[in-house]
């Protein structure tokens, strides 16, 4: 069972949500003004959630599909000669289809490998795609571009 936290700090089951309404007019007096939303619950009661919590609720998977073997989340390579000079590969174990229609990769660490931003993905056919729809024909091409961009930024500094 999954839970969400309202603006008063109460944990409630996600399954109890009937509707997430419009932006709330007021937040509780003991909290600073935040973007908040009214939530109607299945028992007829209501509560208020933060915009951050609302966004998280939209990302809850409505369906999970297994990922193909040899699908990985990639971390950028470190500097040559360092221990992390090669990119780390984290296996993607599933794809989640969210209630807002997005598709997110899941690893053992969670959505997007536990990272806030989606990392590049290495597919079984060798193609690498990043979340901004940029793609490379191989992991080697992606590594070269990452290192080139890093050198260009260092030269500008």
Image (tube, rainbow, N blue to C red):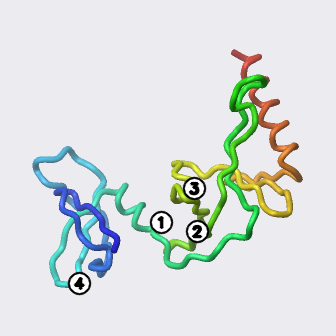
- As measured in the structure, the alpha-carbon distance from the residue carrying label 3 to the one carrying label 2 is 12 Å
Can you give x and y, in whole percent of width and height, for residue 56 in the image?
Answer: 41, 61
Q: How busy is the neighbourhood of tag 1: few (under 14 within 10 Å), some, or many (20 plus)?
A: some
Dots 2, 1 in contact, CB < 8 A: yes
Viewer-nearest residue: 67 or 134:
67
Which label is found at residue 102?
2
The CA distance from mark 2 to mark 1 is 8 Å
The CA span between labels 4 and 2 is: 26 Å
Q: Which of marks 1 and 3 is in front?
A: 3
Mark 4: secondary structure:
loop
Q: Are marks 1 and 4 in contact (CB under 8 Å)?
A: no
- Residue 103 image-quadrant placement: bottom right
Asked if the residue at tag 4 contacts the one at tag 3, i.e. Cβ–Cβ closer than 8 Å, the answer is: no
Q: What element carries label 2?
A: loop
> Which label sits on residue 112?
3
Q: Report how far apart the C-alphas of labels 3 and 4 lie in the structure.
A: 31 Å
Q: Name the residue under label 1.
A: 59
Q: Name the residue that disc number 4 marks.
A: 42
Q: Which of marks 2 and 1 is nearer the N terminus?
A: 1
In the picture, measured across the screen, residue 81 lies left or right of residue 8, that is: right
Task: Using the image, tell me which numbered label, if any, was put on residue 45.
Answer: none
Q: Quick one: quadrant of the C terminus?
A: top right
- x and y, in percent, of residue 54 in the image: 37, 63
Residue drawn at point x = 71 percent, y = 55 percent:
121
Q: What element carries label 1?
A: loop
What is the CA distance from the residue labelled 1 to the residue labelled 3? Answer: 12 Å
Q: Are marks 4 and 2 in contact (CB under 8 Å)?
A: no
In the image, taking residue 17 as reference, residue 8 lies left or right, namely left
Crowd rating for badge 3 (residues with CA inside 10 Å; few <14, some 14–19, many 20+): many
Of circles 3 and 4, which is in front?
3
């Amino acid at each position: 069972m999954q839970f969400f936290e309202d603006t008063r700090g109460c944990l409630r089951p996600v399954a109890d949500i009937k509707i997430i309404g419009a932006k709330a007019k007021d937040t509780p007096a003991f909290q600073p003004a935040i973007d908040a939303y009214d939530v109607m619950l299945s028992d007829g009661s209501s509560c208020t959630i933060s915009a951050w919590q609302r966004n998280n609720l939209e990302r809850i998977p409505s369906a999970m599909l297994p990922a193909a073997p040899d699908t990985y989340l990639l971390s950028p390579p470190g500097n040559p000669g360092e221990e992390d000079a090669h990119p780390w590969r984290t296996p993607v174990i599933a794809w989640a289809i969210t209630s807002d229609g997005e598709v997110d990769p899941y690893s053992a660490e969670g959505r997007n490998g536990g990272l806030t931003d989606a990392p590049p993905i290495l597919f079984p056919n060798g193609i690498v795609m990043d979340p901004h729809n940029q793609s490379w024909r191989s992991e080697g091409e992606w590594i070269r571009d990452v290192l080139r961009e890093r050198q260009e930024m260092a030269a500008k500094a």
